[in-house]
Image (spheres, grey):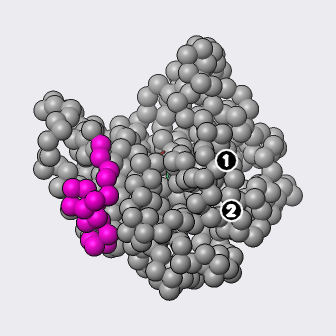
């Protein structure tokens, strides 16, 4: 019963492209019309028809404390009353930078921006300026926001000069982006042998979250680090999704690999629009006004975003000592185990894994290690599963090629409810 949502979608389509402000929200991958949100509370989101869902979308990752956490709401409210933006520096920005530097081992200096896209775009500009080289390497199936040079994937298999994924991206821009399959060091090595001295940077999601959740093979991130170092290219970890999510210090800390630059977003704003990039001091000090690489933002370091993000990070830092990341991973793993055993019982190919507060479920016999294998997953069955789970009161991302998210406020109660919902859904698959 989602009549009001259906009506709201009709109205939205008349005045917004596809009725949405970001494409995946339109449910094209699963069919049907989108659920319109009214409000959220903890691990629950409520739609405008009054239905309640346990939320594993969590605004696509930012909400480590679920919806409308009282401490975050009260902090944002307190700061809002003092004014929403100044265009002068505030102490909140320094506190945020100090927090990031203290939590992420590879970051010495950080610049706040307004989105993950802005963060990756700026990090690439900086990497090209620092190395004075033209090429960027990215991996098939990794998403780094919608900047021209990153909106590119490869054809298939071996490295090729990529075609842009979207009309409007100039061929010249796309040509400076080289792509290889994820989890394939040989392919990357081949690319370096051919173009190594022209490669400014390799950008990677250290745990991929935009082709479903895909884990790096043992030694893979270390291998990328070794290659980039050997050729004098920078390594950029795009931790917009994994930052403060796969562990308190992100994937860099969890895998003990030190990138030169790291991009952040999502969790760092706790649901307000924000991003950041940071890393080695000598590189970051090339950014204006310390150095010549221009990058600016009218609303960068916005006090509301800083207040929300900082509160969320402080709470995570405290909760980390009580083992909250292990708790969230156990929760995700329990969902994976249930999904896999239900699938096996019915003879449906299933696969999945959990890492920190991220998890991935696939209608695929496994393993899923890269974009090609992720793409083999059964899309139609996922679409059915998605709709059945909605009916059961569980909200997951409306595409199999997205990650699932757990928060620190999801409890055993929600876990058991979700497992029962999965059981009901599989009975109808
Ligand atoms: C979400 C995401 C981005 C883009 O962030 P926006 O805030 O949507 O611009 C970039 N990189 C990764 C890994 C992401 O998950």
Residue 128, position as x, y percentages in the image:
44, 64
Q: Which residue is mark 1?
A: 165
Give the residue pinned by disc 2.
161
Quarter location, residue 17? top right
- For the C terminus, the quadrant is top right
Q: Is residue 336 visible?
A: no
Q: Residue 283: give x, y in percent of width and height.
A: 32, 69
Tell whether label 1 touches label 2 (CB within 8 Å).
no
- Give SS at disc 2: strand
Q: Residue at x 59, y 60 (%)?
A: 177
Camera-nearest residue between 200 and 379: 200
Query: Which disc number belongs to residue 125?
Result: none
Question: Residue 412: horizontal and vertical position, in percent?
Answer: 50, 53
Where residue 156 sits, quadrant-wise, is bottom right
In the rendered view, would you say 86 is above or below 345?
A: above
Q: CA distance from mark 2 to mark 1?
A: 12 Å
**Highlighted magenta segment, given as a residue range:** 280-297
Tell me the residue at 45%/73% (across/down): 234
Q: Nearer the viewer, residue 169 or 408?
A: 169
Secondary element under disc 1, as helix, strand or loop, is: loop
């Amino acid at each position: 019963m989602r009549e009001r949502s259906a009506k709201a979608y009709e109205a939205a389509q008349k005045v917004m492209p596809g009725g949405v402000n970001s494409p995946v929200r339109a449910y094209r991958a699963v069919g049907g019309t989108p659920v319109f949100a009214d409000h959220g509370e903890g691990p629950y989101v409520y739609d405008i028809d009054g239905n309640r869902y346990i939320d594993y979308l969590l605004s696509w990752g930012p909400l480590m404390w679920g919806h409308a956490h009282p401490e975050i709401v009260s902090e944002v409210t307190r700061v809002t009353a003092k004014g929403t933006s100044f265009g002068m520096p505030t102490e909140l920005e320094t506190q945020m930078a100090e927090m990031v530097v203290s939590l992420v081992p590879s970051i010495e200096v950080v610049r706040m921006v307004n989105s993950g896209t802005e963060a990756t775009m700026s990090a690439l500009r900086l990497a090209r300026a620092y190395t004075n080289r033209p090429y960027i390497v990215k991996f098939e199936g990794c998403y780094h926001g919608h900047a021209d040079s990153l909106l590119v994937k490869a054809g298939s298999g071996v490295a090729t000069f990529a075609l842009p994924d979207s009309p409007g991206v100039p061929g010249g821009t796309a040509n400076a982006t080289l792509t290889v399959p994820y989890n394939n060091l040989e392919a990357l090595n081949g690319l370096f042998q051919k173009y190594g001295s022209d490669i400014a940077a390799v950008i990677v999601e250290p745990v991929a979250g935009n082709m479903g959740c895909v884990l790096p093979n043992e030694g893979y991130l270390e291998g990328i680090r070794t290659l980039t170092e050997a050729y004098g290219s920078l390594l950029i970890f795009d931790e917009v999704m994994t930052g403060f999510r796969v562990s308190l210090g992100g994937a860099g800390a969890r895998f003990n690999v030190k990138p030169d630059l790291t991009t952040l977003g999502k969790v760092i704003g706790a649901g307000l629009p924000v991003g950041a990039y940071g890393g080695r001091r000598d590189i970051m000090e090339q950014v204006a006004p310390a150095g010549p690489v221009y990058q600016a933002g009218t609303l960068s370091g916005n006090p509301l975003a800083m207040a929300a993000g900082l509160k969320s990070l402080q709470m995570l830092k405290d909760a980390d000592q009580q083992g909250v990341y292990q708790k969230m991973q156990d929760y995700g793993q329990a969902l994976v185990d249930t999904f896999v055993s239900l699938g096996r019982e019915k003879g449906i190919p299933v696969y999945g894994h959990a890492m920190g507060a991220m998890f991935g479920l696939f209608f695929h016999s496994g393993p899923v290690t890269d974009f090609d294998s992720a793409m083999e997953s059964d899309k139609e069955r996922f679409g059915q599963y998605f709709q059945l789970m909605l009916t059961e009161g569980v909200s997951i991302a409306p595409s199999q090629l997205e990650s699932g998210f757990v928060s620190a406020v999801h409890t055993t109660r929600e876990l058991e409810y979700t497992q029962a919902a999965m059981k009901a859904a599989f009975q109808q698959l």
